[in-house]
């Protein structure tokens, strides 16, 4: 691992207009609010939060699939240095090859009318990465084998496959153009537990084999704990905590992270009711609370929390948190 | 006698590709005030089993002649599968049995208010007047922890958040005072923090109303938190069942063991995740013998693929169907 981050995000804001107005600007919904983070090459970076926390939007902004209102995203590897927000035609095309996405639902992500071979080959053809059909077939077979797909499967259509196999096809399609960086957005959420472990192991082994860097977006903390090196927690568009996985799970400093951890149902029937419960629900992002956004549900909240936005502070090496009471 | 007794439930679907077995010789009981958890992967037949309790399966469903579903009410015993017309079925559909579905957004009609949903079903199943039905509904909404229940009563499903919609669903299911509640993945679509709230609410309600609950989920953690007893299903068969502590602490069937091993656990981060090898077979290619033998790590050659294992009792109501058990006598 080198010291230069592969992805560097500085004060990123993403806003969406709420409807249209005839004159002036419509009110804006701030989906990502002043987020800064670094993703190092070769890292398995986890991003967790409840639905509506902005984790998907952040992932999409990095891929230039969501509008960047302000702030900067830089992508830097051995050959290229891109300012993602201002990429133009040729560079943007090249960036699309370098940064790819694995979707959540393998049932919706694959066209039912294309064979598995055509599905996996499509990115190569669209981006013009191969010259001849033989070369395309070669690359398809190569990546299919890496994703543990049977070569005879390539001639079949997606309906013939189970959820786990479909997700492997979807991963093969993402990786066929040889990207550096992959956003995996809830990639195991739609799968059964027995299959989920298989896909997680596959993602991990592909990372080593192909030298990938992942942004792994998930709402499932136990999955993230198992597979990621570093985890960032999002709430209502802002980062509340970011730390190396072990550190975060052994020593969570933000009350939201603690609540999330304690809400995971324990496998031990004797630990019933042993949870630090979080009251209420995530507020609407159109009208977020002042000061610290978590204060409306926070067990530690005091009057100070409604006035001051908590600073993003480094508490120990690599462990950042945004809370006034993070020493507690 | 138990509140609900299901015996030898056998259910097949007539399709263009042939007859598909969805539920194969399933038997279980639920007592009043008890939560039975039904776990299994998608395609294991848990939802189909639940729907047969109310005869909600599509018209191409064929029940075998040995199948029996008996529901005990105060005065009488209802043989659910003998009910034919929808007028007779009202007793179980929403009367004695209520159901909570997985996706609350899809189960509320978008153009009808929450309140009219609730009042409508009360008018069908009880002799209440419209006004008392409305009062009771608002009371139930308050009971499940919805703020400003009077206002929510007049709102539409899209105006509520996911957690609140699921609460409204629970309020609606309970307002007819059912004897049995079927909860089909009630928290799967919710965030963990909201899931914890909804599970808590359901536990409170069981002790308050004393009904039986059939709780369907694929999440063993949720089962550990709410169920008293659990049955594990695979490809239409119950492979293991027993008190929740026994099943989760000393799982007897290789499938249950596999499921527990595949689950990421927070207190054992160094342990590698071990998936259950292979994929769940298509119902069209149902394996002969033990349905799990194609993925089983402890498969016995020439035995598991030839005959169906019978149930082995392991004590305290814990039982499992696997050949490994009768050779070893004890769970591995």
Image: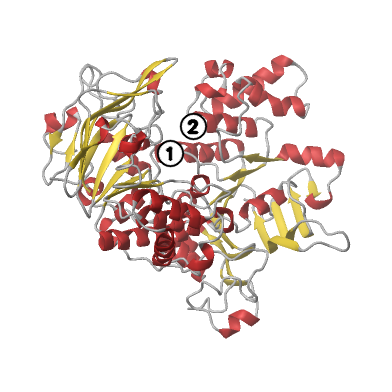
Mark 2, residue position: A163
**Upstream in sequence: badge 1 or badge 2:** 2
Q: Is residue A110 above or below residue B259?
A: above
Density class for disc 2 (Cα within 10 Å; few <14, some 14-19, many ≥20) is many
Residue sitting at x 63%, y 23%: A140
| A137 or A287, nearer to the observer | A287
Residue B75 position (above or below residue B204): above
B217 or B27: nearer the viewer: B27
> Which residue corresponds to the image point at 68% horizontal and 37% vertical from the top-left?
A179
Res. B210 visible in picture: yes
Picture coordinates of residue B218, whole percent (x, y): 38, 43
Crowdedness near tag 1: few (<14), some (14–19) or many (≥20) residues, C-alpha within 10 Å = some
Residue B260 location (% of width, % of height)? 32, 44
Q: Which one is in front, A247 or B287? A: B287
Residue A110, percent from left and from top: 61, 29
Where does label 1 land, which residue? A192
Q: Which subunit holds the residue at mark 2?
A: A
Q: Position of residue B225 (x, y in %)?
A: 31, 56
Q: Is residue A113 above or below residue A5?
A: above
Q: Which residue is found at the position 79% from the left and 48% from the top?
A: A81
The local secondary structure at tag 2 comes to helix
Q: Chain of mark 1?
A: A
Kindly check if marks 1 and 2 are in contact, taking CB atoms under 8 A apart as contact. yes
Question: What residue appears at the point 55 percent right and 51 percent down from the top-left corner?
Answer: B112
């Amino acid at each position: 691992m080198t010291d230069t981050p592969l992805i560097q995000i500085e004060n990123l804001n993403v806003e969406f207009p709420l409807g249209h107005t005839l004159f002036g600007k419509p009110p804006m919904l701030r989906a990502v609010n002043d987020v800064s983070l670094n993703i190092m090459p070769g890292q398995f970076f986890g991003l967790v939060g409840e639905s509506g926390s902005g984790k998907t939007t952040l992932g999409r902004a990095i891929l230039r699939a969501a509008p960047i209102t302000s702030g900067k995203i830089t992508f830097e590897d051995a050959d290229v240095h891109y300012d993602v927000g201002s990429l133009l035609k040729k560079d943007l095309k090249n960036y699309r090859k370098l940064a790819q996405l694995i979707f959540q639902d393998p049932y919706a992500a694959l066209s039912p009318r294309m064979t598995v071979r055509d599905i996996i080959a499509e990115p190569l053809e669209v981006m013009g990465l191969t010259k001849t059909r033989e070369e395309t077939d070669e690359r398809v077979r190569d990546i299919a084998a890496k994703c543990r797909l049977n070569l005879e499967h390539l001639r079949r259509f997606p309906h013939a496959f189970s959820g786990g196999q479909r997700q492997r096809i979807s991963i093969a399609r993402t990786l066929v153009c040889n990207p550096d960086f992959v956003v995996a957005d809830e990639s195991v959420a739609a799968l059964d537990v027995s299959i989920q472990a298989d896909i997680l192991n596959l993602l991990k082994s592909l990372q080593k084999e192909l030298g990938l860097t992942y942004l792994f977006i998930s709402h499932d903390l136990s999955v993230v704990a198992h597979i990621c090196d570093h985890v960032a927690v999002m709430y209502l568009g802002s980062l509340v905590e970011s730390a190396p996985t072990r550190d975060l799970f052994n020593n969570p400093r933000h009350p939201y992270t603690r609540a999330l951890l304690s809400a995971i149902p324990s496998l031990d029937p004797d630990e019933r009711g042993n949870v630090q419960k979080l009251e209420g629900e995530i507020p609407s992002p159109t009208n977020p609370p002042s000061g610290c956004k978590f204060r409306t549900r926070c067990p530690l909240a005091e009057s100070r929390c409604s006035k001051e936005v908590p600073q993003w502070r480094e508490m120990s090496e690599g462990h950042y948190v945004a809370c006034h009471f993070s020493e507690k | 006698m138990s509140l609900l007794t299901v015996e030898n439930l056998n259910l097949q679907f007539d399709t263009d590709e042939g007859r598909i077995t969805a539920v194969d010789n399933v038997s279980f009981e639920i007592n009043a005030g008890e939560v039975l958890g039904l776990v299994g992967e998608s395609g294991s037949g848990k939802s189909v089993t639940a729907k047969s309790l109310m005869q909600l399966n599509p018209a191409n469903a064929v029940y075998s002649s040995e199948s029996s579903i008996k529901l005990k009410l105060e005065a009488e015993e209802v043989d659910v599968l003998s009910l034919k017309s929808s007028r007779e079925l009202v007793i179980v559909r929403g009367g004695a049995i209520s159901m909570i579905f997985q996706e609350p957004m899809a189960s509320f009609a978008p153009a009808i208010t929450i309140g009219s949903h609730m009042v409508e079903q009360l008018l069908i199943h009880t002799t209440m007047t419209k006004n008392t039905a409305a009062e009771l509904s608002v009371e139930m909404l308050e009971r499940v922890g919805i703020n400003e229940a009077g206002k929510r009563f007049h709102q539409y499903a899209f105006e509520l958040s996911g957690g609140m919609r699921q609460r409204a669903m629970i309020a609606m299911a309970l307002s007819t005072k059912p004897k049995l509640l079927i909860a089909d993945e009630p928290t799967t679509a919710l965030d963990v923090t909201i899931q914890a709230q909804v599970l808590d609410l359901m536990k409170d309600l069981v002790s308050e109303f004393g009904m039986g609950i059939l709780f369907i989920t694929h999440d063993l953690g949720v089962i550990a938190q709410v169920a008293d007893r659990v049955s594990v299903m695979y490809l239409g068969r119950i492979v293991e069942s027993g008190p929740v502590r026994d099943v989760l602490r000393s799982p007897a069937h290789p499938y249950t063991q596999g499921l527990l091993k595949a689950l990421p656990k927070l207190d054992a981060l160094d342990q590698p995740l071990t998936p259950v090898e292979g994929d769940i077979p298509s119902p069209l290619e149902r394996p002969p013998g033990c349905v799990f033998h194609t993925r089983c790590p402890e498969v016995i050659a020439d035995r598991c693929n030839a005959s169906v294992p019978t149930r082995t009792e392991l004590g305290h109501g814990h039982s499992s169907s696997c050949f490994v058990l009768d050779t070893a006598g004890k769970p591995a």
